[in-house]
Image: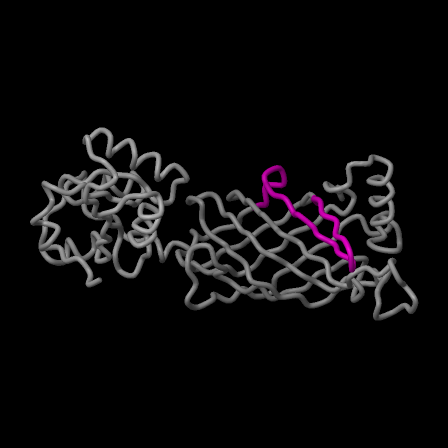
Amino acid sequence: MRPLTAAEIQKHINEDVVIHVLPEEHYQCAHIPGAVNACVYEMTFLDKVAELMQAKDKGKNSPIIVYGAGGGSLDAEVAAEKLRHAGYTSVEAYTGGLAEWVETGHATEGSGAPAKADTEAVKTAPADGTFSVDTEQSVVRWTGRNLFNHHHGTLKLAGGEITVKDGALTAARFTLDMTSIVNEDLTDPDYNALLIRHLKDDDFFAVERFPTAEYVCAEALPLPGCTPGTPNFTLHGALTLRGVTRELSFPAVIAAADADHLTGQAQIEFDRTQFGANYGSGRLFAFLGKHVVNDHVQLHLKLQAKRV
């Protein structure tokens, strides 16, 4: 099926139901005249379309045209596919979208110029300054595994800060409160307490002697070609755990929530045996059987920071 053109839509704009499938704020900014709005990103998309069709006294056999941003975004195609699967029999996707509509000289309705795509959002450098980690709003989720099972829970952050200079991330550090280890998957309180005691003793993290762990970033390099929802920096630095310091690098998403707040997320994986947490390592012990524990530990860091 060949793509719809703006001229064809113009001819049928008063007959067909034309649906703008991007969020309401985008629709309010600019849309094809006469179009209605149902956001394909919402879980209630099909319910909204059903309401719109009923309000127009249209049925599932009535012609529908869906459009979105254009420029390669899959919004219109996905919306058309959802509607066809839901039983709408005459659905076409205008894949050129609002971008092509405007480029070909057609007028729009709305409060202003068409909104720009947000593909540059994660590349926008935060304002210069020092940002202190909000320990109440930040959290670290941990996962440890063995051959047949896994456990997961949380850790609290004890502090940290991020420094931005000349629009670039120049320094970052965060401190983990190892005394705050919590397990979330074991429902038996005795077994849960036993695991936490095991994690805190010398077999794993020796928390009594080393109550904190710290990561210090020496260099943060921008990642080319990043898009919203993918890492935009690679952090190179060192993790100190159990009094042992080892180099550690990982990708991260760092973005400005606003002029005074930064947010960051990272999936971090490290080999615990490099820091002396040797219990159950199949590389270091023989005949472990069911006592094998994977060497690698995963941390999911969710960090919020406020301007100092």
Rendered residue at 85%/52% (across/down): 206
Task: Answer with left or right where residue 266 lies relative to residue 114.
Answer: right
Percent position of residue 59, x then y: 23, 36
Instruction: Name the quadrant of the N terminus.
Output: bottom left
Magenta stretch, overall SS: strand
Task: Answer with left or right where residue 135 lies relative to residue 286.
Answer: left
Q: In this view of the protein, which residue sits in the foreground, 205 or 134?
A: 205
Percent position of residue 52, x then y: 25, 33
The quadrant holding residue 158 is: top right
Q: How many marks?
A: 0
Q: In this view of the protein, which residue sits in the foreground, 192 or 132?
A: 192
**155 relative to 74, above or below:** above
Q: Which residues are magenta?
A: 132-155
Rendered residue at 70%/49% (across/down): 176
Percent position of residue 20, x then y: 24, 44
Rendered residue at 83%/35% (across/down): 189
Task: Answer with left or right where residue 100 lies relative to residue 118.
Answer: left
Task: Answer with left or right where residue 289 lies relative to residue 132.
Answer: right
The quadrant holding residue 248 is: bottom right
Percent position of residue 132, x then y: 57, 45
Q: In this view of the protein, which residue sits in the foreground, 188 or 298?
A: 188
**219 relative to 177, above or below:** below
Q: In this view of the protein, which residue sits in the foreground, 125 or 81?
A: 81
Rendered residue at 42%/45% (across/down): 259
* In magenta segment, residue 140: yes
* In magenta segment, residue 298: no
